């Protein structure tokens, strides 16, 4: 007889699970949780007021969801649920044939290295939200969306793994390229330098220097790492998809990109709120250096990806789009554009999130400033 562990969808429960449930139902009164006695209850405690909540450094009860101080954060969670999807619903058999029979050597090089970078970055994003960001939040309406975000990063990683397994790529090779390929490692190294120091749980955000370090790390994560490197990172594969190849892999990346559109918009909205509520001012010179270093790392990376020309896509277009997106993220943050005059070199990129969907999507007006357009789909 199959059980839950053999077939998780069968609805059967393992025998020992049933025993546990029965034993739980037969607990004696002495085993039941005891209510607090009147001597342990502090009658001077006042109800939580929404106005007292803070994104970070709040002193209210983090377990009380409503009344909302930040309804926009709750709306992000509701909208993320509308975008629910699974890579198991997307069959990529035709893509396996494309990879083996129709992709050129240069296109295979692009595909493998983009997937390699994405696998590592997806895990880094998951760990950063869980260890560096979510636990620092003191308003549960923000935490509940970030819990969803952590799940989505795991989902994205499983999608990349599905591609790797289905095509039969060397997993040991792909998962180690971020360590062994300098052009990929440069981006990972910069990310670690910003993100690792704020993952420690004893970070004191009441200290000015640690608060500034946290905000800069969250800024890098939302505007550069997720808002540009990952958001724009699918573009070379989308260029292959536009030629009728790797269509189903491209479809999975479109779903992931739509998730990313929410991720970076939420982060930028949260950063803006943090800057309003806390005595921290970011140094414009430091922020500009971040953008310039990110551009240099991206230029090295894409030059490696496209060391041999690929039909329908170029280094120049990729980098111009990188600078254009950087400007859009800076505008959303109310900051100076790092690359004035950059043009929208890939105008089709924004349309990649417009997958048919029964439920329409929207966030507040601040979050909708995506590439200068609207984050909406039908």
Image (cartoon, rainbow, N blue to C red):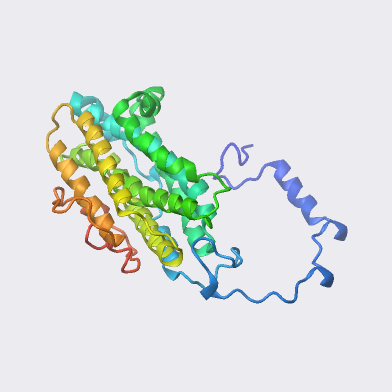
Question: At 33% from the left edge and 28% from the top edge, which residue is drawn?
Answer: 167
Of 348 and 52, the residue lying toward us:
52
Report the side of 377 relative to 57 (left or right): left
Q: Quadrant of the C terminus?
A: bottom left
> Quarter-wise, where is residue 375 in the image?
bottom left
Q: Where is residue 149 in the image (x, y as percent from the top left)?
A: 44, 52
> Quarter-wise, where is residue 115 in the image?
top left
Vertical placement of residue 41 versus 111, above or below: below
Question: At 15% from the left edge and 26% from the top edge, which residue is drawn?
Answer: 308
Q: Position of residue 129 (x, y in %)?
A: 47, 49
Of 203 and 360, the residue lying toward us:
203
Vertical placement of residue 219 versus 304, above or below: below
Residue 313 showing in the rendered view: no
Question: At 35% from the left edge and 47% from the top edge, which residue is drawn?
Answer: 226
Report the side of 309 relative to 143 (left or right): left
Q: Where is residue 281 in the image (x, y as percent from the top left)?
A: 38, 59
Q: Quadrant of the N terminus?
A: top right
Of 298 and 244, the residue lying toward us:
298
Q: Position of residue 84 (x, y in %)?
A: 41, 54
Report the side of 112 relative to 351 (left or right): right
> Quarter-wise, where is residue 302 in the image?
top left
Residue 237 showing in the rendered view: yes
Number of marks: 0
């Amino acid at each position: 007889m199959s059980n839950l562990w053999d077939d998780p969808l069968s609805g059967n429960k393992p025998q020992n699970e049933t025993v546990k449930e029965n034993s739980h139902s037969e607990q004696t009164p002495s085993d039941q949780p005891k209510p607090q006695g009147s001597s342990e209850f502090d009658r001077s405690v006042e109800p939580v007021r929404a106005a007292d909540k803070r994104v970070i450094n709040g002193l209210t009860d983090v377990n009380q969801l409503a009344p909302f101080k930040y309804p926009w954060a709750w709306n992000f969670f509701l909208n993320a649920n509308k975008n629910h999807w699974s890579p198991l619903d997307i069959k990529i058999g035709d893509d396996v044939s494309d990879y083996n029979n129709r992709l050129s050597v240069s296109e295979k090089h692009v595909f493998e290295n983009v997937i390699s970078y994405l696998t590592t970055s997806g895990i880094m994003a998951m760990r950063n939200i869980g260890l560096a960001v979510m636990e620092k939040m003191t308003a549960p309406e923000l935490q509940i969306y970030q819990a969803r975000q952590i799940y989505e990063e795991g989902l994205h990683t499983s999608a990349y793994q599905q591609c790797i397994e289905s095509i039969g790529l060397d997993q040991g090779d792909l998962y180690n390229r971020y360590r062994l390929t300098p052009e990929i490692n440069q981006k990972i190294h910069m990310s670690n330098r910003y993100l690792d120091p704020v993952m420690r749980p004893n970070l004191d955000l009441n200290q000015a220097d640690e608060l500034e370090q946290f905000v800069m790390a969250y800024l890098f994560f939302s505007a550069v790492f997720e808002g540009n490197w990952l958001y724009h990172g699918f573009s070379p594969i989308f260029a292959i998809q536009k030629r009728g190849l790797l269509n189903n892999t491209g479809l999975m990346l479109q779903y992931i990109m739509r998730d990313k559109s929410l991720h970076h918009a939420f982060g930028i909205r949260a950063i803006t709120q943090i800057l309003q509520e806390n005595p921290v001012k970011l140094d414009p010179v430091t922020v500009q250096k971040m953008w310039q270093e990110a551009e240099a790392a991206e230029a090295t990376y894409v030059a490696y990806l496209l060391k041999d020309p690929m039909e329908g896509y170029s280094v120049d277009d990729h980098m111009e789009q990188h600078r254009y997106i950087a400007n859009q993220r800076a505008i959303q943050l109310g900051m100076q554009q790092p690359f004035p005059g950059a043009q929208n070199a890939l105008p089709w990129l924004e349309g990649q999130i417009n997958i048919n969907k029964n439920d329409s999507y929207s966030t507040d007006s601040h979050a909708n400033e995506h590439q200068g357009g609207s984050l909406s789909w039908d």
